[in-house]
Image (cartoon, grey):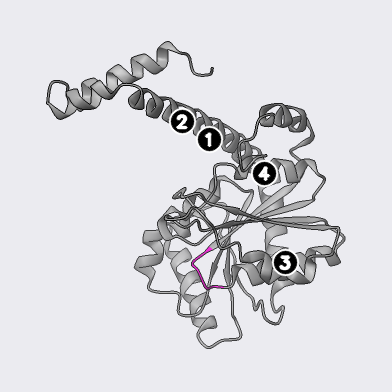
Amino acid sequence: MVEDGADGLAELSAGLYPRTGTAYTIGLTGSPGVGKSSLAAQLVQALRSRGLSIAVLAIDPTSPFTGGALLGDRLRMQSHATDPGVFIRSMATRGHLGGMALAAPEAVRILDASGKDIVVVETVGVGQAEVEVATATDTTLVVVAPGWGDAVQVAKAGILEIADVFVVNKADREGATEAARDLEHMLKMGPEAEWVPPVVQTSAATGLGIDELWDSIERHRKHLESTGRGQQRRRARLLNEVEEMVSQELKERVKAALESDPGMAEDLEARRVDPYRAADMLVERVNGGGVRG
């Protein structure tokens, strides 16, 4: 229902909303090929051994041509498929540049309301636009691998700003220690902060460092609780989501208004109306109908 925007979704959301707000959310992001899905599978195993229930929402890349998605993440997590304490779902980005489907926040809430202790949101690695995951979860893990690229590219991608914990995966490979050292050096060069992201080396293939990774996530969670940052993040997240929903609603209305008024396109083409005036006219028309309805 969430993915399709089905009828009755608003009523469903209203009924579930009071039952949400207890699950802890973890964002898992990084470039393609760094082993995010395998790392998620190891994290699931570690959390289940601690008696925690967990859901994984894997945001997959959508084809710009067919609208279809690979949905391959579930294939990498088959070992957990029969565990009733684990729920794994793939969602397509539907071309949304931030790597997060517009439906993802509501999907997280449904998993929250279902009673899951932890919800992991794994996003497609698309570079600079990955910063969106930081506004969608409580703790953001940025995963890199040995040979992750030069410092300029990493800083440009903005991942230094969004990471709460850095994970150097494939630590059994050559260059992992150097990659971790480079990250720690870059963090020391940055501005002073009340939370400095730890750098954890892991191997999704062997399970190395997974316990240390969970310890780092727990320390960040306690930091958010003790400073009040967690509540601030959640509030900002809700406001951002409402803003996105209103923006999408207005965008659909503007599109419909343009399609129903071919004369505006003709006026623009004939230079009788300039784009600014056309935009003002559309805003007036959409505002006349109210925000909802």
* Mark 1: few/some/many CA within 10 Å (<14, 14-19, 20+): some
On residue 43, the disc is: 3
* Residue 247 marker: 2
For the C terminus, the quadrant is top right
Q: Is residue 121 left or right of residue 12?
A: left
Give the residue at the far bottom of this rendering: 174
Amino acid, disc 4: Ala
Q: Give amino acid for label 2.
A: Ser
Taking 145 as reference, is 242 above or below it?
Answer: above
Q: Nearer the viewer, mark 3 or mark 2?
A: 2
Magenta-highlighted residues:
30-34
Q: Is residue 34 left or right of residue 208?
A: left
Mark earlier in primary sequence (3, 2)? 3
Q: Which mark is residue 158?
A: none
Residue under label 1, please give it: 240
Q: Residue at x 59, y 75 (%)?
A: 169
Which of labels 1 and 4 is toward the front?
Answer: 4
Residue 15's x, y, as percent? 77, 28
Predominant secondary structure, magenta span: loop
